[in-house]
Amino acid sequence: MDGKNIVLLNGPDLSEAAIRVAWFALEHGAGLAFIALASFISNHVPDERKVDLMKQTEAIGCWPEGT
Amino acid sequence: MIACEYGFLGCNELQLTSSETAEVSATRERISALASGDDLPEPQPRTGAIPRVSLGSAFAWSPAGAENGSYYGELNKNGVPKTVHVNGYFRSNGTYVRGYYPECAWYKPALSLDSVHHMIVFESSERSRAISKESTNGMNERFGVPADVAECLDRGKGELLEAAERQAVSALAGELAGHLALTEKAFNLIGVAVSSLPEVVVRDLSQSRKVVTALLVRLSNDLRSAVLLAVRGYALQAATLVASMYETAYTIAAVGSNDNLADDWINHDDPTKPFRQVQDLTSAGLVKLGVPNADAQAKIEYRTYRQLCLAKHVNPLLTDPAWLPHGREKYRSP
């Protein structure tokens, strides 16, 4: 805005604020997948697969090394 | 035969009869002459019926050169190759406008990404009036696009949406690298978990397994869609999807292996109310998961849901830096 015009932009938003919203959304998206998987595995997956899958599910909370 | 005449990829000349081959050659020569501009017809008053051409077929093929001499791949004034051909048409006064490659390829068949990413500017109407003078039946002749879009392109504020999104992907792939790896892992693991279920006949499937499996698949697709949106620069839209994921995840957790609750979900028939209040689903889900101090944790989780819903409900607070949620910056790639 320069006092005379109002400028809106459609299409991709690469602002710092948008990136923070993206971080927030994806981080919690993965967390929600964890909640859903933990429930699914404990209630419906056969016992012989449970341990292995739960281990992998817990790894969703672990980020790549060095970050 | 038409495929061969106009250079479609499906052309198989071996299947043509000799008369069809001759006809194809004649058509190609005619197109070539038109492209070179040697044999262009003078504008003629419109006579007789004009064959109806659907939008789809108008853009279904792109001859090497257009009737006005512009050609496929020719750079427009912004250095972007022209790729969309507009067929010739008659103006309302009966004169014929030759086919051409417009400066800005604004429209293409549905689902194409070659749309214009444009800045919308509300300002004095002087420029609008100038643009509208160049327009016939809502189409701007200079740009070959609808008048309202031409106004934006006239200011040099437009760019191809596909290019803008490509640029967003390259810029954000680094910013979101850790998040992309994590979500991909989650998406794949859901596939592994669902496929690890033993095969059973449908009548032996419990109601809870039916419901939570369907919801889990839905959740994984929502997660994937959120990633696709976020990495292309649509963070608010991604957050909106993740708010919906929250409801799915805690419905899965609350249903667990409870067939009665699953039945309730299946039979829910009130379009004005959710299956259960989200806050109640959160508490019930965390209790079933055996989370210590579930009530306190449910409050924390539900606060996250409300933040995600700022995007979903177009809440202006999301534009206030003080309210902007903070992702964990430690996951940001160096």
Image: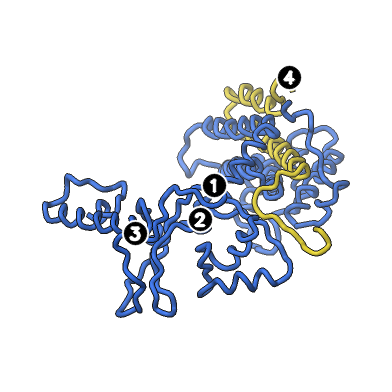
Q: Which mark is residue B144?
A: none
Q: Residue furthest left?
A: B18
Q: Amino acid at mark 1?
A: Gly
Q: Is residue B85 visible?
A: yes
The residue that disc 3 covers is: B37
Q: CA distance from mark 3 to mark 4?
A: 63 Å
The residue that disc 4 covers is: A66
Q: Locate the C terminus of chain B by quadrant.
A: top right
Q: CA distance from mark 2 to mark 4?
A: 45 Å
Q: Is residue B208 visible?
A: no
Element marked by disc 4: loop
Q: Amino acid at mark 4?
A: Gly
Residue sitting at x 55%, y 52%: B77
In the displayed structure, B246 sits above or below B291; it is below
Q: Which mark is residue B105?
A: 2
B213 displayed left or right of B35:
right
Image colour for chain B is blue
Residue sitting at x 63%, y 32%: B186
Element marked by disc 2: loop
In the displayed structure, B233 sits above or below B131; it is above
Question: Which of the two residues, B11 or B105, is positioned nearer the viewer here?
Answer: B105
Question: What x and y, as percent, mark residue B22?
Answer: 15, 54
Question: What x and y, as percent, mark residue A36?
Answer: 67, 38
Badge 1 and badge 4 in a common chain? no
